[in-house]
Image: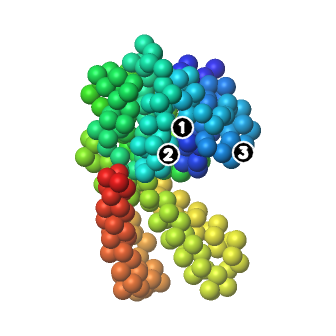
Amino acid sequence: MAKLDEKIGFIGGGNMVYAIGSGLVRCGIVKASQVQVSGPHIENLQRWRDLGAVTCDDNCMVLEHSDIVFICVKPHMLTPCAAQLKYKHVPSAKDASKLVVSVLAGTSLQTLEEAFSFMGSSELKVIRTMPNTSMQVGEGCTVYTGNARVSHHDLEKIHLMLNALGLAQQVPESMIDAVTPVAGCGPAFVYTIIEALADGGVKQGVPRQMALQFAAQTLLGAAKTVLLTGKHPAVLRDEVCSPGGATIVGVHELEKGNLRSTLINAVEKSSQRSAELGKK
């Protein structure tokens, strides 16, 4: 039995939203029959049909027949998408109870409220989220916030959905752009580290697939150690670095290569770009 009775709609069927939708079905939060997805090219939605979801190329149909609607288009497509929905939308008393959930990077609640004001600006309930693709394996990291008309019960529903796919936390909207590069972009940064660590193993003679497996497992283990022990990463690093040993020599090379500064700069630049995308 599904934990939520609401019909869930996704406008846009890309990788991020598929991670959310498929994860919700896999975790039993909703049944596949409760899910409806739209996209401009219905042939690209085959994996959704394989999941058991309903697919179409009509965004308005998803909006009309869903209780919780995820807006998953690219930020620069928000205005034309909303204009199309406004043109075909038939006002209904159900609009007041719908939840509009955005996964658009850098797009503020105010911008979303203006875009969907045709649904009734005085009653529109909007939630802004920043998820990541690790949701597809149940290890996502998502922050979210709602506008003034979103109730505590509405937030509980969204938390149930997002937290089932990893870690979810409500934050002030002012923090979302700062969290975006850490949680939203972070997986790409970590994949780069895994690849580089594996390349180092290959250079030393470790077979490629084995090196990748070891590198990924090492990062997984290190991450779990941080979360489960509550120790600061610097303390855990010191526990690995024996005086005059191999690890401290390697850490010195990382410092010489400015790994720490490079990651901090990557977070800063990604945060700035996220805000720029929202403004555009």
Q: Earlier in the sequence, mark 3 or mark 1?
A: 1
Residue 27 in sight from this viewpoint: no
Using the image, tell me which numbered label, if any, was put on residue 73: 2
Q: In this rendering, is residue 160 above or below 280?
A: above
- C-alpha span from label 3 to label 2: 17 Å
Residue 274, how many percent across, how many down?
36, 57
Residue 86, how many percent across, how many down?
44, 30
Give the secondary structure at mark 2.
loop
Of residues 182 and 273, which is closer to you in this image? 273
Residue 63, how many percent across, how many down?
52, 28
Furthest residue in direction top, as rendered: 93
- C-alpha span from label 3 to label 1: 15 Å
Q: If the image is split into quadrants, where does the C terminus sit? A: bottom left
Residue 185 in sight from this viewpoint: yes
Q: Earlier in the sequence, mark 3 or mark 2?
A: 3
Q: Earlier in the sequence, mark 2 or mark 1?
A: 1
Give the secondary structure at mark 3.
helix
Please tell me in which quadrant of the rendered image residue 60 appears: top right
Marks 2/1 in contact by CB < 8 Å: the verdict is yes
The residue that disc 1 covers is 11
Of residues 37 and 259, which is closer to you in this image? 37
Q: Would residue 204 appear left or right of 155 to someone viewing this image?
A: right
Residue 41, how many percent across, how many down?
66, 45
Give the secondary structure at mark 1.
strand
Q: Would residue 159 appear left or right of 174 to someone viewing this image?
A: right
Amino acid at dot 2: Val
**What's the residue at 58%, 50% (across, down)?**
15
Amino acid at dot 3: Glu
Of residues 40 and 99, which is closer to you in this image? 40
The residue that disc 3 covers is 43
